[in-house]
């Protein structure tokens, strides 16, 4: 982390949100949220009127309106949250009709799912589910209607530039053009570039002469003294300052400002993943792992008996692997080879069918008869559910590797250790027959860069078909 102690000490928000804007419409998002709040208030009596007056008599029985204020408020608060999360208050969303419709519709659906979940969990059977649904539909109709009415005005204001943020851009070339485009898209009514300067320099005279809302640094020679001086000038003038982290180096592309005690820190986390998403992923592991152990317990028993009857030795095979950030742990599998077969690997290495540091032999003589069937259906992997419970692994992630397999890794390849290893993963469900080691490794890195709960679900759904296709696991 890089300390930015020289900068004016104000409290910094930890969350990544919208860019801090200045100018005549700096608080547009907050105004829009307040307007949506008023719209959601208006949706309540409309939904109540439809339920009591317009529907057939057998569907109009309701308690007093006070009974439904709580559930409606829950849906409304959830809806405002999901609208914010889905970027409903960004100018590109308002100006593009398909994006507007999709954003509002999905946010309403998420809010209704939240409301239905609460009603079901707390068994609030006296609350009409139909009313909650009508409230969601009324809210969606009003939110979309208000936005459709506002769109022509937004287009005219953006084209006129009367409410645009006035920006000074420091830098040249493609980076400066890209920063201008991003700021223009993100600003409610666009930006007006007051001046373009080739490099960082004192701009007191420019600030004194011109009406300037923001200064954006895209490129140029940037020293700590220059940046501190410019920040002081902007602080005195009340002008917003934006600095592209690319100026600090490629490694700062994911930098965030954090307040730790009395210090302001520039933090770089290579895992730009949604924190709540990672928490949900771990919660799913802790819930699903014991459930899967119970559901597959007959297979465990059958496998254990078959292994003991087939060949002498223990039921389980325990091997040291590298996990999160190269932490060592003992991975557990059902034994599928004859006892002591690991010592024969150097002898068989000349028959290795895989490239890179991994060892793979299709007709491996060390594998027992039962072991072939265990591997055929990946039953030998089931004990790794215990590793998931212990926190060594996740259900889905990059495969855990042996220390001998990573000795020659390049620095960029070691990024695969930045997530918990998994029982299954993108490499395992991809077209792996004949796939090179480097290609498989690139697949793991692609998984880390693109990780989301949705991607995990897709991998999970593709795992069983991959097993049935009898593909060779890496």
Image: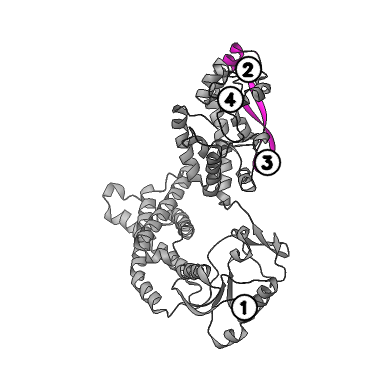
User: Who's the residue at 68% across and 19% down the image?
Assistant: 340
Residue 42 on image: x %, y %? 38, 64
Residue 322 on the magenta segment:
yes
User: Who's the residue at 63% across and 43% down the image?
Assistant: 417
Q: Is residue 283 visible?
A: yes
Badge 1 or badge 4: first in the primary sequence: 1
Q: Secondary structure at mark 3?
A: helix
User: Who's the residue at 48% across and 44% down the image?
Assistant: 455
The answer to whether marks 1 and 2 mark residues whose Cβ atoms lie closer than 8 Å is no
Above/below status of 376 relative to 452: above
* In the image: residue 388, left or right of residue 167: right
The answer to whether marks 2 and 4 mark residues whose Cβ atoms lie closer than 8 Å is no
Residue 247 on image: x %, y %? 61, 66
Q: Secondary structure at mark 1?
A: helix
What residue is pinned by disc 2? 338
What residue is pinned by disc 4? 351
What residue is pinned by disc 1? 234
Mark 3, mark 1: which one is toward the viewer? 3
What residue is pinned by disc 3? 326
Residue 129 on the magenta segment:
no
Identify which residue, 222 or 67, lies in the foreground: 222
Q: CA distance from mark 2 to mark 3?
A: 29 Å
Q: Which residues are magenta?
A: 304-332
Q: CA distance from mark 3 to mark 1?
A: 44 Å
């Amino acid at each position: 982390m890089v300390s930015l102690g020289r900068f004016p000490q104000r409290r910094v928000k930890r969350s990544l949100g919208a860019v801090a804007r200045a100018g005549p419409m700096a608080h547009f998002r907050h105004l829009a949220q307040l307007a949506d709040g008023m719209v959601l208030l208006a949706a309540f009596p409309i939904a109540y009127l439809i339920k009591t007056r317009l529907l057939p008599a057998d569907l109009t029985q309701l308690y007093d309106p006070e009974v439904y204020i709580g559930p409606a408020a829950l849906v409304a608060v959830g809806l405002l949250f999901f609208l914010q999360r889905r970027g409903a208050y960004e100018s590109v969303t308002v100006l593009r009709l398909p994006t507007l419709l999709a954003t509002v519709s999905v946010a309403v659906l998420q809010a209704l799912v939240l409301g239905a979940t609460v009603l079901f969990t707390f068994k609030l059977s006296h609350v009409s589910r139909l009313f909650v649904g009508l409230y969601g539909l009324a809210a969606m109709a009003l939110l979309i209607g208000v936005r459709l009415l506002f769109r022509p005005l937004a287009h005219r204001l953006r084209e006129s530039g009367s409410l645009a943020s006035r920006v000074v851009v420091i830098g040249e070339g493609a980076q400066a053009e890209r920063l201008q485009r991003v700021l223009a898209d993100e600003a409610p009514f666009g930006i007006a570039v007051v001046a373009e300067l080739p490099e960082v320099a004192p701009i007191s005279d420019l600030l004194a002469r011109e009406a300037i809302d923001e200064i954006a640094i895209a490129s140029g020679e940037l020293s700590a003294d220059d940046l501190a001086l410019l920040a002081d000038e902007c602080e005195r003038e009340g002008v917003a300052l934006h600095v592209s982290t690319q100026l600090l180096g490629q490694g700062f592309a994911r930098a965030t400002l954090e307040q730790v005690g009395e210090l302001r820190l520039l933090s770089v986390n290579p895992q730009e993943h949604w924190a709540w998403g990672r928490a949900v992923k771990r919660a799913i592991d802790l819930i699903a792992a014991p459930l899967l152990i119970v559901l597959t317990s007959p297979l465990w028993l059958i496998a254990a008996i078959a292994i003991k009857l087939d060949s002498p030795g223990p039921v389980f095979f325990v091997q040291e692997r590298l996990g999160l950030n190269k932490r060592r742990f003992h991975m557990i599998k059902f034994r599928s080879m004859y006892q002591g077969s690991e010592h024969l690997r150097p002898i068989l290495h000349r028959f290795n069918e895989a490239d890179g540091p991994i060892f793979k032999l299709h007709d491996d003589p060390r594998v027992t008869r039962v072991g072939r069937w265990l591997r055929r259906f990946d039953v030998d992997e089931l004990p790794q559910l215990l590793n998931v419970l212990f926190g060594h692994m996740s259900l889905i992630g990059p495969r855990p590797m042996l220390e001998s397999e990573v000795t020659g890794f390049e620095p960029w390849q070691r990024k695969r250790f930045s997530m918990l290893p998994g029982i299954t993963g993108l490499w395992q469900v991809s077209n792996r027959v004949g796939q090179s080691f480097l290609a498989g490794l690139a697949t793991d890195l692609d998984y880390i860069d693109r990780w989301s709960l949705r991607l995990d679900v897709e991998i999970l759904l593709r795992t069983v078909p991959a097993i049935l296709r009898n593909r060779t696991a890496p």
